[in-house]
């Protein structure tokens, strides 16, 4: 059973200035190693120290990027000039600035979406992909999470989510919540932030969810603004764009890892992606959910980066 590599610190920290944003990115590991970029989820979350530890620091040049408005990037929670095309532009600017010709993409959930969108836009710049908890950003995927899917499993938290908004907003829940969190009614704003994050955490964590462990709504507001900004704009992608453009990346090495008990991004998405990428390897984890946590999931992810290092060497 493989575990995370030991903690490590970045050997270089950088900032990219673009469209009024300051995007944070860092380098860890071996400067002459295989370049890999870690793409965090959310949208809106940011990178954490443990994200460096999925990669052998003796073999990888590890680049972590806090996407626009996320993590250590500034301004925190900024949604202006913040869309999928801009994030792809940022990655290209970072890659060119670091004088990297081609790099490996590692992303989970929204990070997997962004990795696929970037690879389809710039396949010549990609060594391969390692994807976890695939999210394809189709209408069906959004409907599963916020309309008529997982609410059948968590009807109690779903009801709390509905009650955070006026009845007039129930017909389009995402749009209603988005308008609330970017609006000027602070009481409504914070009520929606709390309800949305309770819902998301309950679905993501399952029986490990502790509602008393959530940060205050004020702390969660920046992340929630970006998350709902992307959801309300359907992730700035055409319907089914990812699957329809898979022919552009069919020859790239690809490992897909997905937990069978992932209720945020059901396994069907990873299975559909694998059918479009016949050369990809799909590993289904029988005892894992959505998070990049737990022995089974960590073992699979670290093993994937180790195997990819051998393949790319």
Image: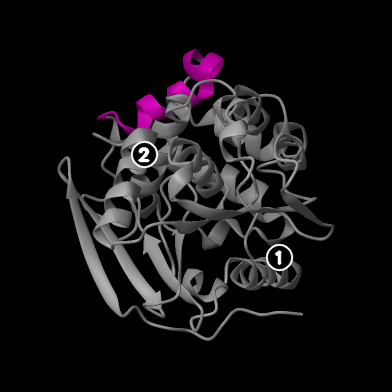
State the SS at label 2.
helix
* Residue 106: mark in rendering: none
Identify the residue under disc 2.
225
Residue pictured at 70% horizontal, 40% vertical: 277
What number of labels is visible?
2
Residue 297's label in the rendered image is 1
- The answer to whether residue 260 is left or right of residue 106 is right
Who is closer to the viewer here, 49 or 300? 300
Left or right: residue 150 compared with residue 181: right
Main SS type for the magenta part? Answer: helix
In the image: residue 17, left or right of residue 26 = left
Nearest to the observer: residue 40 or residue 272: 272
The picture places residue 158, in percent across and down from the top left corner, at 64, 34
Magenta segment boundaries in residue numbering: 168-184
Q: Quadrant of the N terminus?
A: bottom right
Q: Is residue 69 visible from the viewing direction of this image?
A: no
Residue sitting at x 51%, y 49%: 111
Looking at the picture, how far across and down is residue 80, in whole percent?
Answer: 24, 34
Magenta stretch holds residue 39: no
Q: Are marks 1 and 2 in contact (CB under 8 Å)?
A: no
- Quick check: can you spot residue 197? yes
Check the image and report above or below for 39 versus 85.
below
**Does residue 183 belong to the magenta stretch?**
yes
Please tell me how crowded label 2 is: few (under 14), some (14-19), or many (20+) other residues with Cα within 10 Å: many
**Mark 1 element type:** helix
**Could you tell which of marks 1 and 2 lies nearer the N-terminus?**
2
Q: Could you say where residue 225 lies in the image, as x and y percent from the top left?
A: 36, 39
């Amino acid at each position: 059973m493989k575990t995370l590599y030991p903690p490590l610190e970045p050997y270089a920290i950088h900032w990219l200035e673009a469209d009024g944003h300051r995007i944070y990115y860092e380098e860890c590991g071996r400067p002459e190693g295989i370049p890999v970029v870690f793409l965090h989820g959310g949208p809106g979350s940011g990178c954490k120290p443990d994200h460096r530890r999925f990669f052998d620091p003796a073999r990888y040049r590890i680049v972590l990027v806090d996407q626009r408005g996320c993590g250590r990037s500034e301004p925190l929670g900024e949604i202006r000039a913040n869309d999928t095309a801009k994030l792809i532009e940022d990655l290209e600017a970072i890659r060119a600035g670091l004088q990297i010709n081609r790099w490996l993409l590692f992303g989970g959930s929204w990070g997997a979406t962004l990795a696929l969108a970037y690879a389809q836009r710039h396949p010549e710049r990609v060594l391969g992909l390692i994807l976890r908890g695939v999210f394809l950003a189709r209408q069906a995927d959004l409907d599963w999470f916020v309309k008529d899917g997982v609410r059948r499993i968590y009807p109690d938290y779903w009801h709390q989510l509905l009650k955070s908004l006026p009845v007039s907003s129930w017909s389009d829940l995402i749009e209603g919540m988005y308008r609330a969190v970017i609006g000027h009614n602070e009481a409504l704003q914070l009520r929606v932030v709390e309800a949305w994050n309770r819902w998301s955490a309950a679905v993501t964590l399952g029986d490990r969810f502790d509602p008393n462990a959530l940060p205050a709504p004020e702390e969660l507001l920046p992340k929630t603004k970006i998350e709902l900004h992307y959801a309300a704009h359907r992730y700035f992608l055409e319907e089914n764009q990812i699957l329809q453009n898979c022919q552009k990346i069919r020859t790239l090495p690809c490992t897909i890892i997905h937990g069978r008990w992932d209720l945020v991004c059901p396994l069907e998405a990873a299975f559909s992606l694998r059918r479009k990428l016949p050369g990809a390897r799909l590993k289904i984890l029988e005892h894992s959910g959505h998070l990049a946590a737990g022995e089974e999931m960590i073992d699979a992810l670290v093993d994937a980066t180790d195997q990819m290092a051998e393949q790319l060497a």
